Amino acid sequence: DLLETIRRKEKVFDGTADVWTYDAHRSEIMCVIREKDEERMAGVFNFSGRDCEVSVYPGKNGTDMVTGETVETEKIIVRAHDFRWIRM
């Protein structure tokens, strides 16, 4: 499974990674930051029935860890009931 492969490969999913929440200022969005060494990712989860745009660490670009798409971290689109893993 793709998600398991990503989790095995990426340092940020190591059990010793630092983990904290990031306030996205939207009740339907949960954002979790994971950091290990110099690597950081944001897990952005949408619990609503509509697409949402969220800003996480504005001014940076990231990469969607699942699709490989380049993402502007100030305009992350998360589809309804979906999630994004963004490497920053």
Image (tube, helix red, strand yellow):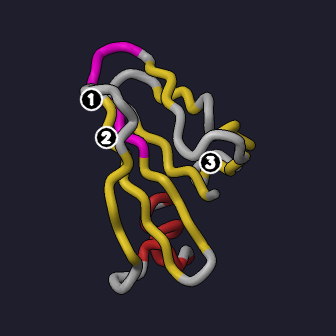
Q: Please tell me in which quadrant of the rendered image residue 83 appears.
A: top left
In the rendered structure, the answer to whether residue 46 lies left or right of residue 13 reads left
Helix or strand or loop: what does disc 3 sit on? strand
Mark 1 or 3, nearer chain start: 1
From the image, tell me which residue sits under label 2.
Answer: 30
Is residue 58 within the magenta segment? Answer: no
Considering the image in quadrants, where does the N terminus appear?
bottom left
Residue lying at 50% horizontally and 23% vertically, measured from the top left: 53
The kind of residue on which mark 1 rests is Phe
Q: Residue 37 carries which label?
A: none
Q: Please tell me in which quadrant of the rendered image residue 70 appears.
A: top right
In the rendered structure, the answer to whether residue 88 lies left or right of residue 13 reads right
Mark 3 or 2, nearer chain start: 2
From the image, tell me which residue sits under label 1.
Answer: 47
Exactly how many numbered labels are in the figure? Answer: 3
The kind of residue on which mark 2 rests is Met
Residue 75, given in percent of the width and then of the height, sits at 61, 28
With respect to residue 78, does 45 lie above or below?
Answer: below
Helix or strand or loop: what does disc 2 sit on? strand
Q: What stretch is highlighted in magenta?
A: 44-50
Residue 84, given in percent of the width and then of the height, sits at 49, 43
Residue lying at 57% horizontally and 32% vertically, measured from the top left: 76
Q: Which of 7 and 42 is in front in this view?
A: 42
Mark 1 or 2, nearer chain start: 2
Q: Residue 64 carries which label?
A: 3
Residue lying at 49% horizontally and 29% vertically, measured from the top left: 54
